[in-house]
Image (tube, helix red, strand yellow):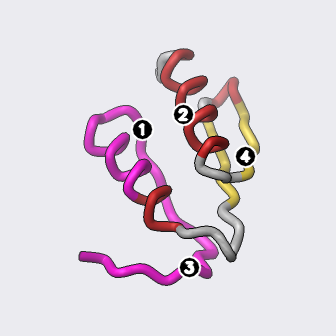
Amino acid sequence: MIDKTIMDTTIHDLEKLGCGLETIRERHIIGVNIPKEMDYIPVRKYLQAGCSANKWDYEESCLCHTYDVA
């Protein structure tokens, strides 16, 4: 189960990056909408850092952004 503080901090951080969010708190799910004109790289780095720290897992879907996978 994810810690409430982690979820609240994650929501705050993603909103600060400019993302739109939908949450299902009971299931600990955050849906992230990244506008097409927004730079995806900072968001992806944030998500990867949290995943590497075992705070969460994430999946990319309907990706219209391009980025270097390096």
| Label 4 or label 2, whichever comes before in sequence order | 2
- Residue 41 position in % (x across, y down): 44, 66
Between disc 3 and disc 1, the foreground one is 3
Q: Earlier in the sequence, mark 1 or mark 4?
A: 4
* Mark 2 crowd level (few <14, some 14–19, many ≥20, 10 Å Cα): some
Mark 1 in CB contact with mark 2 (< 8 angstroms)? yes
Residue assigned mark 1: 56
Relative vertical location of residue 6 with respect to residue 69 in this rendering, above or below: above
Are circles 3 and 1 on residues that touch, CB within 8 Å? no
Please state the horizontal and vertical placement of residue 56, each as a whole percent of the image.
42, 38
Magenta residues, start to end: 45-70
Who comes first in sequence, dot 1 or dot 2? 2
**How far is disc 4 from disc 3 in space, using C-alphas?**
17 Å
Q: Which residue is mark 2?
A: 10
Asked if labels 4 and 1 touch by Cβ distance under 8 angstroms, the answer is: no
Query: Mark 3: few, some, or many residues within 10 Å (few <14, many ≥20)?
Result: few
Residue appearing at x 62%, y 42% in the figure:
16
Indicate whether residue 51 is drawn in magenta.
yes
Tell me the number on the disc at residue 21.
4
Label 1 Cα neighbours within 10 Å, binned few <14 / some 14-19 / many ≥20: some
Could you tell whether 12 is left or right of 70 in the image? right
Amino acid type, mark 1:
Trp
Amino acid type shown at disc 2:
Thr
